[in-house]
Amino acid sequence: MTMDTTTTPRSIIELKDVRKSYGKVTALHGIDATIREGEFFSLLGPSGCGKTTLLRLIAGFDEPTSGSIEIDGKPMAGISANRRPTNMVFQSYAIFPHLSVAENVGYGLVPKRMPKAEIAAEVDKALRMVDLSGYGDRGAHELSGGQRQRVALARALVMRPKVVLLDEPLSALDKKLREQMQVELRALQQSIGITFILVTHDQEEAMIMSDRIAVMFDGHIAQLDSPQALYRHPVSERVASFIGVMNFLPATAKAAGEGELALDIAALGAVTLPVAAVPEGISPAKVTKIGVRPEMLTVLFDDSDHAERVTEGVVVSTSYYGDMTYYSIVLDGAEKPVTISMRNTAGRAVAPVGARLRIGWGAESIVLFS
Amino acid sequence: MSRISRILPNWLGIYAVAFMLFLYAPVVLLPLFAFNSSTIIAFPLTGYTTEWFTVLWETEALHSAVRNSLFVGITTAVLSTLLGACAARAMARYRFPVKRGIVGLVMLPLVLPEIIVGVALLVVLVQLGVPLSLWTVIGGHVLICIPFAIAILNSAFASLDQSLEEASFDLGESRWGTFRRIILPLVMPGVISSLLITFTISLDEFIIAFFLTGTDVTLPVYIWSQLRFPAKLPSIMALGTIMLALSVLLLITAEWFRRRAARRQGLDVQAPGGFVG
C-alpha cells in the first residue's frame, strides 16, 4: 500500500522466515520483513504477540529456532549480542546503579580501548544529544524516570550503532512525559538518521513515531505498512480494531457489472464500488463486512449541511473530550450503535441523548472485510 | 479497654528484661572476670588486673592455636563463599529439575546437629584412610558454612536485575567483563558480608573441629583443653573477652556491608535476609 515516489532506501535488516519456539510453545511463526536504513520502525501488538521475542532475536540475546537475520548485509547467526551493530534501550532502562551517569554512558566505549579523553568527549556529546549536559557526575539513583530513559538512550547512541532497539522505553513514564518523549525521540531519530526499532503495545505511540509499523498477532506479522496505510486500509478486522476505533457493519455482496461491486450494507444501504477498492486477498464476492472510522461519519447538524449519502440515527450516549465529542448513535435499521467523532465548534452544543440526527457518509471512506 | 491489655505490657516488659538477662548476663561475666585479679571465678570481685591478658601473650601453645584457627577460618570463609556464590547464582538465574529439593539438601546442614555431622564425617574419613589435619576441619567447616553463605549471597544475586547483565553484554562487553564491571561490584558487599560471617562461624566452631582435627588444635579446642586446669581459667576468660569483641565487630561489619549493598541497589534496607538487626 505504501508507495515510495523517491529513491528506495537501502535495507538495514532482513528477516527471512524467522521462527522461534520454546519447547512446545511457538513464539514466532516465520517472520519475513525488511527494515530500511534510517527509518523509525515499530513492532506493535498486544502482549504475548512475539514482538519482544523478535527484538531480542535481532539484539542477539537469543538465537532463532530457524530462519535468518541479516543486519547490514551480514548474517547474524552465531554472532552474540556484544558483537552486533545494535544497541538496546531496555524497558527497565537497566542503568548500572553503582556508576555515575557519565560512566553509564561511556560504559560501552571502555571495551573498545578508547582513550579516556576521547571517551569523555563522546559522553559529553551523547549527553548533549539527549539534553542532559552537566548531569555526568550524578549517581544513577538521583535521576527521575525521564532522565534515566535519556541516559539509557545516550548510552546506546554513543556506540554509534547501525540500529537502536527500544523495548517499550516509554511505558514506565506518566502520560504527559510519555507524550513529550514520543515527540523528542522521533525528532532525535530524524536528526541523527539512525534506524530505530521500537517495540510497543501502544498503537497511538506507534502511529505518532513510526515511518512503518509491523502489527503482530500470535507470532505473525498481520500487516506491515505506514501509519496512514494501516489506519486507512487495514487488511483484517483485527488490525482495524487494534489501530484506532473502527465501526463494523454487516454487508452483503451482490452481483455487479464489469469492474464494479455492489454492496448492501446494513443501516447504510446499497452502494457500488469499483473492484479496485477491494483489498488484495479478498475476493469481491466474499465481502461480509465493512468498516468505517468515527471521523468518516459526519453529523449533519444543520438542514443545509449535505453529504454524498445521508442516513439517520438516534443518540444513545455522548463523551465530551473538549476538542472532540464522541457520539454513540444507533442508525436506523441497525442493532448496535456506531461511534462518530465530531470536532466541537464554538457555536454548537453537544446533541442530547435521544436526539435524532442526520448522518452523512461517503462510499470511498468504507473499508471492506471478508 | 480490657483488663488484659492493661496488665499485658507490664508482663511483657518483665519477660523482655528476664530474657535479656538470661541471654547476656553470662556474656557480661566474661569480661568482668577477665579483669578480676583473683584466680577463682567467683564473686565478690577482688581487684582490677590485666595480668591474664599478659599470660595470653606469653603462651606459645595459644599462639599456634590462634594461627591454626585463622588459617582454618580464612580458608573456610573463602571456600564456602566461593561455593555459596555459585549456588546462589544458580538459584537466582537458572531453572533446573528438582531445584527445590536440591536447594533443601544444600541448606540441610543448617539444621543438622553438629555432633552428628562431626561423627559422620569422622567415620567416613577414617574409613577412607584420610589423615586428620586442619584440612579435614576445613572440610567440615565448609559444609556447615555453605548454607549461611548461600542465605546471604542469595539476596545479593536475586536482587541483581538480569537486564543489567544484558545491557552490559549489549554494549559490547564480554562475559568476563560483565562479571568484573557489573556483577562483582554489585554483589561485593554481599560477598564481604558472607566472608565475615563464615569466618566468624568457623572461628567459634568447636564440635566439628574437635572431632576432625589431628595434632594441630584450633582455638576453641585449645580453650576446651585448658578448662581442665582451674588456674588457667582467668586467662581463658581474657581470651574469651577478646574473641567476643572480635566476633561482635565482625558481625556488625558484615551487616553494614549487607545494608550498603541493599542501599546501592535501591532496596529496602530493613528487608529480611541479614542476621543482625
Image (cartoon, coloured by chain):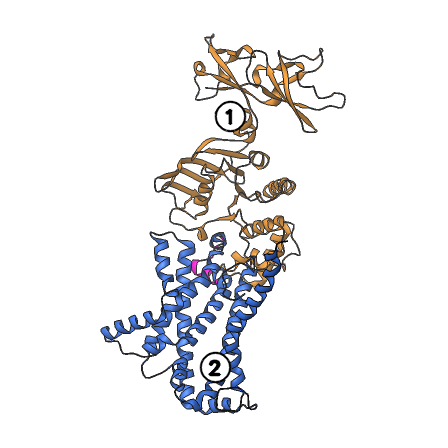
Chain colours: A orange, B blue
Vertical relation: A53 (above or below) B67: above
Q: Chain of mark 2?
A: B
Residue range in magenta is: B170-180
Mark 1 on the same chain as mark 2: no
Specify whether A186 is left or right of A252.
Answer: right
Q: Looking at the image, do the residues carrying marks 1 and 2 touch, with CB atoms under 8 Å apart?
A: no
Q: What SS does tag 1 mark? A: loop
Q: Is residue B171 magenta?
A: yes
> Image quadrant for the C terminus of chain A?
top left
Type of amino acid at the residue the image marks with label 2: Gly
Residue that appears at 51% across and 71% down: B251
Specify whether B58 is left or right of A247.
Answer: left
Q: Position of residue B269 (x, y in %)?
A: 56, 60
Specify whether A345 is left or right of A332.
Answer: right
State whether residue A270 appears in this view.
Answer: yes
Residue that appears at 40% across and 68% down: B145
Q: Chain of mark 1?
A: A
Q: Position of residue B138 (x, y in %)?
A: 36, 74
Vertical relation: B89 (above or below) B226: above
Q: Position of residue A229 (x, y in %)?
A: 54, 27
Q: Give the prevailing secondary structure in the magenta stretch.
A: helix
Type of amino acid at the residue the image marks with label 1: Pro
Residue hosting label 2: B240
Q: Nearer the viewer, residue A143 or B253?
A: B253
Residue hosting label 1: A234
Residue that appears at 49% across and 11% down: A260
Q: Nearer the viewer, mark 1 or mark 2?
A: 2
